[in-house]
Amino acid sequence: MDWGSILNNTLAGMLTPTILAFALAALGLAMHFGFAGLLNFGIAGFMAVGAYGYAISVLTFGLPWWAGMIMGVAASVVFALIMGIPTLRLRGDYLAIVTIAAAEILRLLFLTTAFEPVTGSADGLFGYNNTGGFAEANPFPVGDYGWGPWTYNEQTLWMLTFGLIVLAVATLLLWALMRSPWGRVVKGIREDEDAVRALGKNVFAYKMQALIIGGVFGALGGIVLATSTNVSPGVYVTSLTFFLWTALLLGGAATIFGPVLGSIIFWVLQAFLTNVLPALAESGILPVSGIQAATLRYVLVGIGLMLIVIYRPQGIFGDKREMTFVK
Amino acid sequence: MSSNSEHQKSTGLHIGTAAPGVQKVNPILVIDHVKKSFGGLTAVDVQHLEIPSGAITALIGPNGAGKTTLFNLLTGFDTPDTGAWSFKGKELAGVPSFKVAQMGQVRTFQLTKALSLLTVLENMKLGAKNQTGEKLLNSLFPFLWRKQDNELEAKAMELLKRFKLDAKKDDFAASLSGGQRKLLEMARALMTDPVLVMLDEPMAGVNPALTQSLLEHVLNLKKEGMTVLFVEHDMHMVRHIADWVVVMAEGKVVAEGPPDSVMKEQAVIDAYLGAHQDTDLGVVTGRIKVISEEGK
Amino acid sequence: MQFLSASNPKRLLSSLLLLLIATVLGLGLGTSPASADSVGEELERGITGNVKLDGEPLGGVRMVVEGGGYNAETVTGADGKWYIGVPGVEGDTYKVTLDQETLPEGIAVTGEGGATKEVVLGKSSPLVANFFIGEGVRVTVSMFDQIVARLIYGLNFGLMLGLAAVGLSLVFGTTGLSNFAHSEMVTFGAIAALVLGTVLQLPMWLAIPAAVLLSGGMGWALDAGLWKPLRKRGLALVQLMIVSIGLSLTARYLFQYFVGGGTEQLPGADSTMVPLFGSVALSMTDLVSMAISIVVIMGFAWWLLKTKTGKATRAISDNPDLAAASGIDVDKVIRTVWIISGALAGLAGVLWAYFRPGIKWDMGAQILLLIFAAVTLGGLGTAFGALLGSIVVGVLVETSSLIIPADLKYVGALVVLIGILLFRPQGLLGKKQRIG
């Protein structure tokens, strides 16, 4: 077994555009579930809206990259409104079912051959980073940067920098919101919306605002992901939503940095298992085939999710008293 | 106890003989033909009812009389099948509950709704109306709301002191006792600067040591110019602090009048268990024993 | 909660939304596929063909491939060629359809079997599927027959969904849990039947009931080993729901671990077509499947309405506290509900394996949302509502593919799910109560 390469790959997995995208989406979930108590199981749909909104704006409508990204964000606002209006007045589990269904509807719409010229169907979309000028906007000259496992070429460095800036702004925004009186109302709604309503707050409006803000974070996650890989409908599946929930709960749902740290832990563990399990299988320590070894890590994700929710629902970084499951 | 007995009952609230639907000199709430049924069962059917302004009105009646449902209807938490009602002359039918609260008609709940994972102080500050920082865009700029927030904190601390909760200001509301949560809920309601305070069973589940202070707090509301409407099973509290009593049974108002006279009415006695006709109504409800001595 | 509040803005917004959706759909449909003559090239296997009329290539002819829960379509290029990649493995059956509406006027498929043929993937890929085309009258199935056929397929699909949905609904009604792992109970049933039927070589008439029993046992084991202890721990409902998601992920990938990523066929699928009337025909398997669904559902209804446990189940769904106070052993009833829920889901899995056709590690997850849609449509927690909702969803999914592209047929059901929440949140049979 080549421990050196396993360690190297795991360490390299600590900072990737995927993690930044994941952290942004998890931050959106924290806004939804951790702070506002909204059961959003369609965060993958928000990510898809952002990614497709960006790519389609560039490829079909010829917008520059930054305008395409703004369109992606705007589309997620519309998506939040469409989902929120019918469901935010209803009991929480209705929102769960509607969001998961809406995300799936979106995925099927992106997947169908009926809209292939626009969505690329099963092949997805690519080339928009060049067409829209995102790649060209790269301020870094050609070359290799960083050291050891964290060595990047100028393109990856640009993606990481862009992702880090977006993530930093989103984190700061969430922190500023949640320490304000607005955040107080939203947290109050999480605890008991009738009580907050009885104090004269327009609960529906606050929930809608929270849904939109979290949704925009999700869309930004999709956009950051789109800067580094193709936009493909196979990515934005229900499992992605569940993985994001795992990362969120791992870090602590009602915390600012929990979602970010949770995402990093989730992906570093994934990177480690991706490397170590097949290696163990190959060297005969684990009596399984290579493909089975790759499947095992998802089994471990599922078990991990169950264990966290049962034994440490406040997450690794959450305040023990401030558990997020109140009802 | 002595301060209690000193308090002045408001009189001369009504015009004409005290009977269901009697006109009030200065009504704050006027209810007409409000009807609500659940699956064929009529929960509330109030023809006409006026709640006097600046006084403490008790809403009593046996279990299932529709008191809490009427509360929910009046505050916009539930929608009646038919009917109209107005608060300070403004029609309230169709007005959502949060707007009702903004107009100055604030309520508490039978099952206390303390916001468990907010601190006591946060609970209080949440109550205040018209906060600049509660608007999404303003919230990002602390210089817009910091000053107001500090003022609210001072006001909240003053109220918490009055309700003897100031030492707990940084504790999560979840850690309070049942009675303390009732107090917190009432104090939080006061943060909204209400005109009409509607209390749904303020004494339910409160330990006897706290009942006296709760009573005084309710009396204080009136002293400060607020109108109080409360639902209560505890006849001692009703007789002791209410200026006016409305009796409901099977969704209808069966009697109303000053506490001493209304309790003697046949309709009221009939409304409660027939077997207890000879006994004092306070005993019927069972909870009176605890404090009946100190009240008389 | 504020049902009265701002009803006008809400109505305005919903109509705006409808307008928006209509615009988006119209936009998409307007730009119908023009050049794409091959799809799914990244898949390992494919089906290809060449559409020619008297040796001249025909472009712009729509080709559809369906099977194993997979749908794809393309349009022939100017050279008359087309290619559709498929995810299946050797031995899988696909239905290839040439859309005669897209042929020039007066031209039709003249070969035997008409415009649809079933093909079985062989060793070599791609598989060639060609049609004989010539002048002539189209051997089209009349619209009426198509509708009837779709209704019957839909009923079959709906009954199968119903088996899964009533179990989910009962669990929700008695415990409040939205069980996302229900789809894995469905898959478990199918895989159990596969193992019993192919590995242990049991005859299917024995393997299927045994698989259903095993699924019931799985329901028992899950309640005894997981759900009951968690209830006793006092976990919140949302927590339980997320635990069920974790369980769903765990089970799903364990299935993949054991059966791999491909599609396996259950033995005994009899595809003898039984003509019903006109051109409507059903395979023997479909007929047997429908008969089994109907008998089992009637048995279930009898249990729910007439037996003591069934009545207790309904009592708990209505009001758990009252039921407990009136001496019903809530834990025992919930245990029974889990067993029944597991068994019905397992049976649904076996039938779904024949309907798709094929067994795959995520076959249950493919219909989980349809099951949820059915349960919500009927009214959360009402068993008969779930059944009605399932039939509506099943029929809707099958008939909608007459109008919308086949690969969007699940979308219709999910849109209806959201629509129903807009106008009748308590569902079709749910009681009108406080749901806000």
Image (tube, coloured by chain):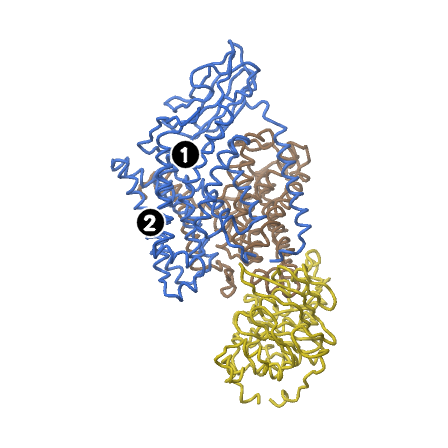
Mark toward the start of the polypeptide (2 vs 1): 2
Q: Is residue C386 above or below residue B98?
A: above
**Dividing the image into 4 quarters, which one contains the N terminus of chain A?**
top left
Mark 2 = which residue? Answer: C218
The answer to which image quadrant residue B24 occupies is bottom right
Chain ID at mark 2:
C
| Residue A16 visible, this angle | no
* Badge 2 density bin: few <14, some 14–19, many ≥20, Cα 10 Å: many
Give how far across and how far down residue C132 sits, in percent: 47, 14
Mark 1 = which residue? Answer: C356
* Badge 1 density bin: few <14, some 14–19, many ≥20, Cα 10 Å: some
Q: What amino acid type should be assigned to the residue bearing mark 2?
A: Met
The answer to which image quadrant residue A31 occupies is bottom right
Contact flag, marks 2 and 1 (Cβ < 8 Å): no
Residue lying at the far front of the rendered structure = B266
Residue C380 in the figure: left or right of residue C253: right
Give how far across and how far down residue C154 sits, in percent: 45, 35
Helix, strand or loop for disc 2: helix
Name chain B's colour. yellow
Disc 2 to disc 1, C-alpha distance: 24 Å
- The chain letter corresponding to brown is A
